[in-house]
Amino acid sequence: MARKKQYNEEEVIEKATDLFWRNGYEATTVRMLEKEMGINQFSIYSSFGNKQGVFLQCLDTYKRRIRSITHKLENSKNSLKGIERFFYDFLEFVREDKSFKGCLVTNTVNELKEDTDPLLRDELGQFVIHMKRLFVNNLSQDPDKTPELIDKQGDYLLNCLLGLSVSSKLYDQQKLKGIIEITFMNL
């Protein structure tokens, strides 16, 4: 007979998400997860398979959290203005608790190595592709933009968002808002 879980899976994944977000994927150990999640190693392996399994669940949690701002971009009819609003919302999102932790996905992408697990690399890549698609969809609302320009600007905006995430770990709000202003002056 299987043992009943003595913990709420959603709650322990929220705790693990915050741990990965603060420390990064590589630096987070199973021992650290045990302590943060409040469950033992056996429970981690039983429920999630391994550290990677925990992280993939955390990535799903992060995607749900960031939907609080991406849904506005998905529904925006304001082309470039909608994307600019998203950048300001993103800045608030990554600094909501006044910490300087940046974006979970960007932080993890910055850790990628040649031998990074392909599944992890693919999941992160899918998130990045989704973000570019949101930018492209909004840029496509401008009838004066060619498909080639839209694609290049989508890449540019994605790169700017990744850079903003890294910068959010260092700079104050005023400087970050200046970065956003300049980003959109160039489009």
Image (cartoon, rainbow, N blue to C red):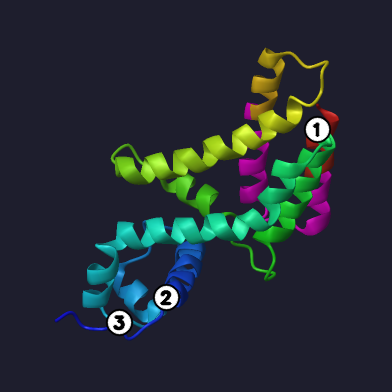
Residue on which disc 2 sits:
12
Q: For the residue carrying disc 3, how many other residues have a C-alpha within 10 Å: few (<14), some (14-19), or many (20+)? A: few
Q: Where is residue 34 drawn, in percent x and y?
A: 32, 77
Q: Amino acid at mark 3?
A: Lys
Residue on which disc 3 sits:
5
Q: Is 173 part of what is drawn in magenta?
A: yes
Q: For the residue carrying disc 2, how many other residues have a C-alpha within 10 Å: few (<14), some (14-19), or many (20+)? A: some
Q: How many marks?
A: 3
Q: Residue at x 81, y 23 (%)?
A: 142
- For the residues labelled 1 and 2, the Cα–Cα distance comes to 38 Å
Q: Amino acid at mark 2?
A: Val
Q: Tag 2's secondary structure?
A: helix
**Relative to residue 125, is residue 100 depicted above or below?**
below
- Which labelled disc corresponds to residue 79? 1
Q: For the residue carrying disc 1, how many other residues have a C-alpha within 10 Å: few (<14), some (14-19), or many (20+)? A: some
Q: Residue at x 39, y 78 (%)?
A: 37
Nearest to the observer: residue 172 or residue 165: 165
**Relative to residue 133, is residue 88 depicted above or below?**
below
Q: Earlier in the sequence, mark 1 or mark 2?
A: 2
Task: Please report the bounds of the magenta region as a residue range.
Answer: 155-178
Q: Are marks 3 and 1 in contact (CB under 8 Å)?
A: no
Q: Residue furthest left?
A: 1
Q: Where is residue 183 drawn, in percent x and y?
A: 78, 35
